[in-house]
Image: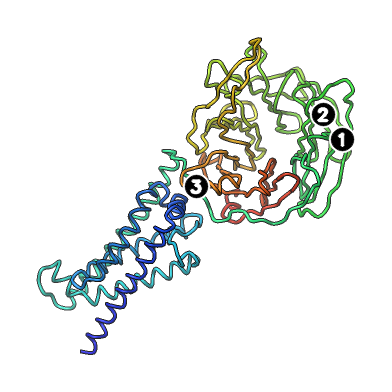
Amino acid sequence: MNLERIKNSVVLTVSYLYVLLFVYAAVSKLLDFENFQVQLGQSPLLSAHSIIISWLVPLVELVIAVALLFNRLRFWSIYFAFFLMSLFTFYIYVILNFTNDIPCSCGGVLEDLNWTEHLIFNLVFVFLAVVVLWILKEDFSCSVLNFQTNRITATFSVLALVLVTLLVCFGIIWTLFKTSDYIISKENPFIRKFSVRPVEFVKQIDLDFNSYYIAGYDEGVIYLGNYTAPLHVLTIDSSLTYKKEEKILIDKNNYSFRSLHLKVLPPFFYLSDGAVPILYTGNTVEWVGTTHTIIQPYFSKIVPMDTMNFVFRGLSSDTNENIIGLFSLDQKDTLQLLPRLLEKQSKHDGLFDTDGHLIYSKELSRFIYVYAYRNEFIVADQFGRLDYRGNTIDTVSRTRLKIATTSDGKEKVLSKPGLLVNGSAFVHRHLLFVDSRLRGKFEKKSVFERSTTFDVYDLRKRKYLMSFYIPHLNGKKLHSYFVTDDNLYVLVNQQVIVYRFKNNLKKEFE
């Protein structure tokens, strides 16, 4: 008799614990429903199914909690509580072992648990549910098998039910994981994958002026160019402890420059202005520029691939449209234009709808062109041969621009600002970093508007990896940045800020 009382007490205690847990968890989710849905939307397992799951989970929790209050429903209500808790447990297991960790979506006090503690918490409740199912095994045999069985048969029946349920639960979670990844990768619903703090703040330094930009990096030294004083270079060590000024010496008396821009690839520097067919090169020891004449009369972007070879974006003399080209300093009469790389989307444009960002990966020996007004980028080798055309994760495949011409009909202009998709881009090794200007699904508007959103792509695997935020500083957005193996350096107004990569992002460089 005492044993029966103990069993009944265990059943009631576990039932009430589940009632308390599910009611609390469901109410917490519903009271902060928007945040709960956002967190689900950022889960690598559930993001593609987050809308239906965000409603289904608290509803099921409440239904089970109510059913647990009735004795005649006790076995099956405990069973479905066990089923649901097993799903939650396998969810955490897959998160821990197959994905980057992400914020928990449980709500309430459970948000204070780390992943290991959360897994242990769930396992305890799974175990308690199994104990109750074993205690109520006779109820199971009578309701399912329709006759009274002996204790051994009933025990094996419940054990089989538990094992089959665990296999089904793991299969459901694994299927959600794989289908969600497929939907994000292939069907492009614009759902970002946010990892937990892939970067962490290290240090910042004030430059006194906001006219600097990051021109290059090497061996712990950051090179800063200056928009208003283009011949002045500021060098800072990577720990932001000292600064040193340099001045570039060039013969510029015969040229009227508009905007000289500096690019440093130690031990060399490159200084150019697209309005003048001139390129200055020199070393970072003497800082004396040697003049090189370029055949292309006008170019808006120029990127060194090595000390002698360059890729540029200029204007075609035939169509007055953007065009990619190659030239070499050791073959000054050779200019290779690549008219088929950039694809315009309007027969009346070819200038604004092909605007974008030109960058080069030394490790891949590839240059990349990221369109500014559409979700596309180009990867080509150093000879201009196209590797492939990739897509950023947003859904803007067509430029949204309104083009007009000046009164004399000679010049194209934007009649109003277009929808900017990709603000800037940077490549380090095989990883492409894109400063995205569009808010994805399930992202908080308030967070997005106060941050710069970086989307990271693996150019070798041709896939999107993850995203992360860099907060604005005093309402100012970063305007220049540089990526190394260990750190992200950003310029915000007149501040240089260093962020260190955490392992969940740093390992992707390997």
Mark 3 residue element:
loop
Q: Is residue 416 above or below residue 243?
A: above
- Earlier-in-chain disc, 1 versus 2: 1
- Earlier-in-chain disc, 1 versus 3: 1
Disc 1 designates what residue?
248
Which residue corresponds to the image point at 32% horizontal and 62% vertical from the top-left? Answer: 61
Q: Is residue 5 above or below residue 30?
A: below
The numbered disc on residue 443 is 3
- The residue closer to the viewer here, 183 or 11, is 11
Cα separation, mark 1 vs mark 3, equals: 45 Å
Disc 2 designates what residue?
280
Which residue corresponds to the image point at 45% horizontal and 65% vertical from the top-left? Answer: 108
Colour theme: rainbow
Which residue corresponds to the image point at 50% horizontal and 47% vertical from the top-left? Answer: 443
Q: Amino acid at mark 1?
A: Ile
Mark 2 residue element:
strand
